[in-house]
Amino acid sequence: MKRTLQPTWAMIPAAVVLWASSTLAAMPATADDFGRQLPVSEGDRLRVSLERGHVEVVRHDDAVVRLEDGTFSVDPLHCTRCGECTEACPTEGRRMVGETYTVGRVIDEVIKDRVFYEESGGGVTFSGGEPLAQRDFLLALLDECRLRGLHTCVDTSGMAEERVILQVAELADLFLYDLKLLDDNRHRIFTGAGNRAVLTNLMALAQRGADVWIRVPLIPGINDDIGNIDALAGFVSALETDWPVFLLPYHAIAQDKYARLGREYPLVGLEPPLQAQVEAAADRLRDAGLRVNIGG
């Protein structure tokens, strides 16, 4: 009997080989924080010395930390993610976020909570980033979970070769599948890539009889218009499955991540959709015969 997904899940990123992150861009340290007068001037590029735990002035292009307007900031284009700055920073303003995991180490972490999965009927979700981007690692993890009788779920944008997603479908019990825009040109404008692979792979999963939850991030002014909602309803209906559709109202949680990466958040000031707008989109999808949930 197929197990039913329940709330208790271990959230494991397939992209577990992560990078050295800095909170310096979001929470700058000033020269005063170092408790000494630094021999720096505006525009100087700085390098952290591990041996003495202090900041040295350098003037060449491979330095990562820069002093501007009395504040240290990060140049991510030159960061090699070596982690040395995190050990030397006296204010602990820089830290490593992520480690390199082996398949065995991930499974060891998963197994620790096995009793909760068994009691709730839950399992393990592999997310990202994009887990399909690390196919071999993901397949190995899914295989190990299957050997241990653990229910598995892959949270994906669907941006992969069809053969990859079908390989994953042989081992995964469930897909959480993002569906954003049906128009290829608009999809390319807002995501940086067309949607042909996304749609083709979803059709392939339908043909295979995979278990899929379709998730639609509802973003005001981008994909909440009637044209896109109707196109989405038509496409999903044509798949002739009983897959549920989850409408996920936009939120700005990612804005802090952008700041930590030193990147400009593209949707500054955008407000979440009103509940009435979300309900209207849900009703339109339901009118097309789809099972629709809000949130999840």
Image (spheres, rainbow, N blue to C red):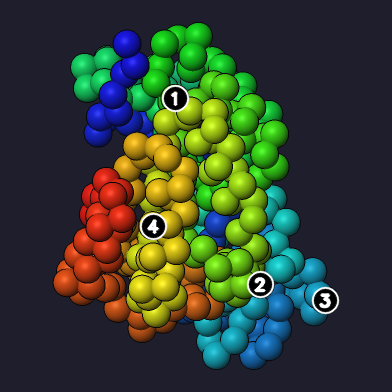
Residue lying furthest right: 60
Mark with earlier residue (2, 1): 2
Which residue has dot 4 on it? 233
Whether residue 123 is visible, yes or no, is yes
Q: Please name the residue shown 25% across and 29% down the image.
A: 6
Residue lying furthest left: 276
In terms of depth relative to the viewer, which is nearer, 240 or 202?
A: 240
Mark with earlier residue (1, 4): 1
Label drawn at residue 82: none
Q: CA distance from mark 1 to mark 4?
A: 24 Å
User: Would residue 227 be found to the left or right of residue 161 on screen?
Assistant: left
Kind of residue indicated by mark 2: Asp
Q: CA distance from mark 4 to mark 2?
A: 44 Å
Q: CA distance from mark 3 to mark 1?
A: 52 Å
Label drawn at residue 173: 1
Label drawn at residue 75: 2
Residue 141 picture location, percent across and down: 56, 23
Label drawn at residue 60: 3
Q: Would you place residue 252 above or below residue 292 in this image?
A: below
Q: Please name the residue shown 48% across and 28% down the image.
A: 209
Residue 54 picture location, percent across and down: 62, 64
Residue 22 picture location, percent across and down: 53, 61
Q: Would you place residue 73 above or below residue 295 in this image?
A: below
Q: Would you place residue 201 above or below residue 266 in this image?
A: above
User: Would residue 2 be found to the left or right of residue 46 on screen?
Assistant: left
Q: Please name the residue shown 62% across and 31% down the image.
A: 166
> Secondary structure beneath disc 3?
loop
Q: Please name the residue shown 54% across and 21% down the image.
A: 171
Mark with earlier residue (3, 1): 3
Q: CA distance from mark 2 to mark 1?
A: 41 Å
Q: Mark 2 and mark 1 in contact? Answer it, CB < 8 Å.
A: no
User: Would residue 268 be found to the left or right of residue 266 on screen?
Assistant: left
